[in-house]
Amino acid sequence: MPNFYIWQVLGSYTAAGKTTHGDLLRFLAGDKNSGLFESGFYPIMMFGLPAACLAMIRQARFPKIAAGILLSGALASLLTGITEPIEFAFIFVAPVLYVVHALLTGTSLFICSLLGIKIAFSFSAGLIDYVLYFHAPAASSNVWLIIPIGAVYAVVYYFVFSFLIKRFNLGTPGRGEASTGLSADWILPESQRGPAPSKKGAATATADADTLASQVIEALGGKENIESVEAASHACASLLTILIK
């Protein structure tokens, strides 16, 4: 990807008889002309995407379900700069949000470069690298500006994501059937979802447990493959025991 060339190959810097290449390595070596290509990621990863998570949770019809994945993703983005858990939560169900995210990231890179903010990272643009690289090495410059810039991007991300999700009824986590055609818990792993609706349309807890028990038996290849039941909810375990006998 283009980042690899910029971070690992672009430019050269010689100090103490040693030549280094790439923006990241030159920054570590103390090159005051490096660090411009990385600084713009900090406001997005530390502020923008966590704010986007808050927007998706606030716009969810089932906020607890949305919070289950998005809060951990927001924390990972803030601390380490790992953004994939957040981006994969909306890139396929609401690609317009990813386009907006890409454009906002570009503006952040431009603004930070324009303001002469210079800071690189060892892993990604999270709080851990921000603290480590705030004063060292000597190549860092105007790093404190990332905080107010990030605060602005947090507000922008929150309101832009909120508006687009609500205006276009986008299928972000926790929105449920109204926008995805899927059940409210679609974002959860299959093992954590509730039972599928009963074919007879029964809404009682017993009918739900009956449906779940039947599905478990079918998934295991039929009652012929089951010798005993040891771990299940009380109601489901009772039904499984009855159905396999």
Image (cartoon, rainbow, N blue to C red):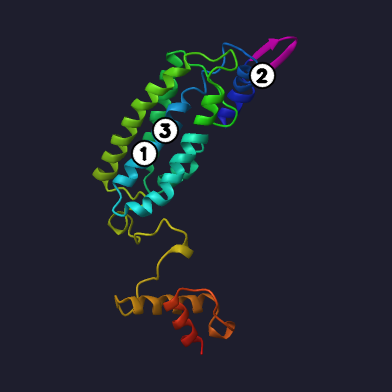
SS at mark 3 in the image: helix
Can I make out residue 81 in this image? no
Dot 1 crowding, Cα within 10 Å, few <14, some 14–19, many 20+: many
Considering every residue shown, the one lying at the far right of the view is: 17
The numbered disc on residue 62 is none
Residue 42 in the image: state x and y as whole percent.
47, 27
Question: Sequence order check: which comes first, mark 1 or mark 3?
Answer: 1
The residue under the point 58% across, 23% down is 6
Q: Amino acid at mark 2?
A: His
SS at mark 2 in the image: strand
- Whether the magenta-drawn stretch holds residue 51 is answered as no
Q: Which residue is mark 1?
A: 52
Residue 73 in the image: state x and y as whole percent.
46, 43
Considering every residue shown, the one lying at the far front of the view is: 234
Up-down relation of residue 150 to residue 220 (above or below): above
Q: What's drawn in magenta, residue-wise?
A: 12-21
Give the alpha-carbon distance from disc 1 to disc 3, as whole Å: 13 Å
